[in-house]
Image (spheres, rainbow, N blue to C red):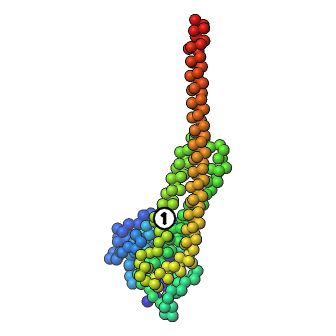
Amino acid sequence: MLNNIHFVSVEIPNVITKKDLEKEFPGLVLTTIEKSMVGEISNEKYIFVATFGIITFCNFTNDEISSFLSRLNIREANSYATALINQDYLMLIDGDCSAPRIDDKTIRYSKFDKSIASIISLALSQSVGLEISENSLEKMMEKSVRIYEKLETLRVKDRKSLMDFAAVIAKERFHILNKLYLLDKPDIIWDDVELESLYNQLSFQLDLKSRFEVVEHKISYLKESVDFAIDKVNQKSSEYLEWIIIWLIVIEVIFSIYAYVIKPFLS
């Protein structure tokens, strides 16, 4: 067994299917974990494809990663390390570590198998997925600030763009809760204390829970902000309709006065 095992998780703009993996790696053994695909290429080489647009390479060289991404027609393949959101971790096989020990750079453990590779890949994928959401939310926060800056000048015609923005926020929240599944521990660790320790330590080092809470807070803030803006526009719309009704009543009164008072008088 190798002494050093390198994990690299990378965001992928293209959807990777089971057929793509089987074509790339003939004879590949594919299984699933937490709705994601795990491909066993050899005893010490795995590929993990998450449902939320992240792929994790276990024991691939940088050239192999670039080559694989290139064959997926990803434009940033040759510069994925700087052009795409990614995260890596080094695992050291240490016979003295009967239980997993993790710091901010390395994972030390005496064992390595498919389950361990899957847990590490899942945690790294979640971390990269969170970073993608964090970047997306930063852009939404900037848009929210611009909306607040022109809050008093919003008009009824702006309601559609506000509703579209609200839909984007709802979609982002759905993506985080239903695909990153950070609130639940992976099923495969329930009966394995050491795998649970591995995941919990990685989750702590990658700061998954607190980052998730910050993301949730930002989404709640964005939702409240856009709801307030929509209410403001709806209020203006109601006022506009009220004035229309008032003027229609005034016009009706004028016509009535003319028909029943002025016209008979002129006759």
Counting from the top left corner in percent of width and height, residue 77 is at: 49, 68
Amino acid of disc 1: Leu
In the displayed structure, 131 sits above or below 256; it is below
Counting from the top left corner in percent of width and height, residue 167 is at: 51, 53
Number of labels in the image equals 1
Viewer-proximal residue, 2 or 62? 2
- Residue under label 1: 177
In the displayed structure, 111 sits above or below 163; it is below
Viewer-proximal residue, 29 or 200? 200
In the displayed structure, 111 sits above or below 130; it is below
* Image position of 103 (left or right of 199): right
Q: Does dot 1 land on a helix, a strand or a loop?
A: helix
Viewer-proximal residue, 181 or 259? 259
Q: Quadrant of residue 242?
A: top right
Residue 66 visible in the picture: no
Position of the N terminus, as image quadrant, is bottom left
Residue 141 visible in the picture: yes
In the displayed structure, 196 sits above or below 144; it is below
Counting from the top left corner in percent of width and height, residue 10 is at: 50, 70
Counting from the top left corner in percent of width and height, residue 64 is at: 46, 76
Category of crowding for the residue at label 1, using alpha-carbon neighbours closer than 10 angstroms: few (below 14), some (14–19), many (at least 20)? few
Q: Quadrant of residue 213?
A: bottom right
Q: Residue at x 58, y 46 (%)?
A: 231
Position of the C terminus, as image quadrant, is top right
